[in-house]
Image: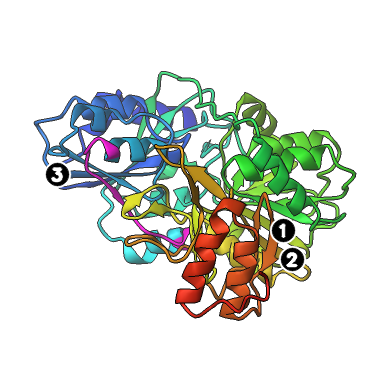
């Protein structure tokens, strides 16, 4: 049978494709820009007919119709590998949304070894190429593992999906597909980076002082890491590399400015290495059929032992709050889930393990509460329910707009005094009293 005949034989409507879903099934929706759209609408129409269908995705890039149609979670129960802004909004409205705690680099192995009840995997892909492959687009991540484990595989073709070169595990062959749906070709989600604040710029300047020619850069999600990337593009640094989890617009600006050559990378030299991408059309157009980029499964990009093969790996990530012992919370505010662990722990480990590398946690020193009062993000201890994303033994450099401190090899009192020194000035006296009460203040920084 020819590829075109095989394609025609598997081509069905979205309604026909989702008819395979039964009550109680586990259904994976695809991740990031690869979340299904037409199949989502078709499945939502089966509300009331189905019960307890467990649906999961990773970073909710589109508003899931199954959640909109069933906010009580009677027919469809929404689960997330990584809590995103959309998930958080649902949860804040009382919609049942459940987070799956993961160490992101391990997810392909979870899927292959720990999950034995994956009934349907449906996801958006680029159009089939002449060899019969559907490219996963900018979400290699754990897509191949899901396609291997699912009992039924449905691809939803989106002509706007960029074809992202690998690496490996970046595509699925038609012979491994059960149904093909030609989607409505909706535009890809545009995620422009927020303009950097004055605080972002101050933090970025401190981080830039830690860099030199030939560094390999990993930027996490958020305004501060993006500000670092934009300032790198305007700096005198050269021959920088990219080995990251998430590729964002800032990397393209660094590349176009001639800073990101990858010439000194130990692995994937001269390649922008990543596992998923979210940004604007500038990024998606750059990725399409571009041999300068290499997408890999997250078990490659985020595995600390692999990422750390690049010397001078600089990993830059955000935190929500840090306690006086150096424990980093980056995913919750008390019991309220804000986001997931993602790859932060992976790259904190990788940055330290890299020869000449550094792991940098950045955060604004404070925020204002509803009454306009300044509240410190450096806290005496994490509140009940606060998640320790990075343990105190692993934290390396911490940066706020008031400076930077090194946690490695420091005693508890040195950590407390160092962190208080970069807290907002209006909050330092209160933090000192807390440190004194906990027996971790020696007044050497007073």
Residue at 34%, 24% (x, y): give it.
Answer: 38
The answer, for residue 326, to whether it is visible in the render is yes
- Tell me where residue 414 appears, x and y as whole percent: 63, 76
For disc 1, the neighbor class at 10 Å (few under 14, some 14 to 19, many from 20) is many
Residue designated by label 1 = 314
Residue that label 2 marks? 357
- The answer to whether residue 178 is seen in the rendering is no
- Residue at image position (72%, 67%) is 309
> Decide: marks 1, 2 in contact (CB < 8 A)?
yes
Q: Foreground mark, 1 or 3? A: 1
> Which mark sits nearer the N-terminus, 1 or 2?
1
Q: Coloring scheme of the render?
A: rainbow
Badge count: 3
Q: Which one is in front in this view, the residue at disc 3 or the one at disc 2?
A: 2
Q: Please say if the residues under marks 1 and 3 sit with CB atoms less than 8 Å apart.
A: no
Mark 3 or 2 closer to N-term? 3
Residue 21 lies, with reference to residue 430, above or below; the image says above
Q: Distance between the residues labelled 1 and 2?
A: 6 Å
Residue 265: give x, y in percent of width and height.
Answer: 79, 58
Residue at coordinates 81% horizontally, 50% vertically from top-left?
240
Q: Please name the residue that numbered disc 3 is placed on.
A: 52
Q: Specify the quadrant that holds the C terminus.
A: bottom right
Q: Is residue 131 on the magenta stretch?
A: no
């Amino acid at each position: 049978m020819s590829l075109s005949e095989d394609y025609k034989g598997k081509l069905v409507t979205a309604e026909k494709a989702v008819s395979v879903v039964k009550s109680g099934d586990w259904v994976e929706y695809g991740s990031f820009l690869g979340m299904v759209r037409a199949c989502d609408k078709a499945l939502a129409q089966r509300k009331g007919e189905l019960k307890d269908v467990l649906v999961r995705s990773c970073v909710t890039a589109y508003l899931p119709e199954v959640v909109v149609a069933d906010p009580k979670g009677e027919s469809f129960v929404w689960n997330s590998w990584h809590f995103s802004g959309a998930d958080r909004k649902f949860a804040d409205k009382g919609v049942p949304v459940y987070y799956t705690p993961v160490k992101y680099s391990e997810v392909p192995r979870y899927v292959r070894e720990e999950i034995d009840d994956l009934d349907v995997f449906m996801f958006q892909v680029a159009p089939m190429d002449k060899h019969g492959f559907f490219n996963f687009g900018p979400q290699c991540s754990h897509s191949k593992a899901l396609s291997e484990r699912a009992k039924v595989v449905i691809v939803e073709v989106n002509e706007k999906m960029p074809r992202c070169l690998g690496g490996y595990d970046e595509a699925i062959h038609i012979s491994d597909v059960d149904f093909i749906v030609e989607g409505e070709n909706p535009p890809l989600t545009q995620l422009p980076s927020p303009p950097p604040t004055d605080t972002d710029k101050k933090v970025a300047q401190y981080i830039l002082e830690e860099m030199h020619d030939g560094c390999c850069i990993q930027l996490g999600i958020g305004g501060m890491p993006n500000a670092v990337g934009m300032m790198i593009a305007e700096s005198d640094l050269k021959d920088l590399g990219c080995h990251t989890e998430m590729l964002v617009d800032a990397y393209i600006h660094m590349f176009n400015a001639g800073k990101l050559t990858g010439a000194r990378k130990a692995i994937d030299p001269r390649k922008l290495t990543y596992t998923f991408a979210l940004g604007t059309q500038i990024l998606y157009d750059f990725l399409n059929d571009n041999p300068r980029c290499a997408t890999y499964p997250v078990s490659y990009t985020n595995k600390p032992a692999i990422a750390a093969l690049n010397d001078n790996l600089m990993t830059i990530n955000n935190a929500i709050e840090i306690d006086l012992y150096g424990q980093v919370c980056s995913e919750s505010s008390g019991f309220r889930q804000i986001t997931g662990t993602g790859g932060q722990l992976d790259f904190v480990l990788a940055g330290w393990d890299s020869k000449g590398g550094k792991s940098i946690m950045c955060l604004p020193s404070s925020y204002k509460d509803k009454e306009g009062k300044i509240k410190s993000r450096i806290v005496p201890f994490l509140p009940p329910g606060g998640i320790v994303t990075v343990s105190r033994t692993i934290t390396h450099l911490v940066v706020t707009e008031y400076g930077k401190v090194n946690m490695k090899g420091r005693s508890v009192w040195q950590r407390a005094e160092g962190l208080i020194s970069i807290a907002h000035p209006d909050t330092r006296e209160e933090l000192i009293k807390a440190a004194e009460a906990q027996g971790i203040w020696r007044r050497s920084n007073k």
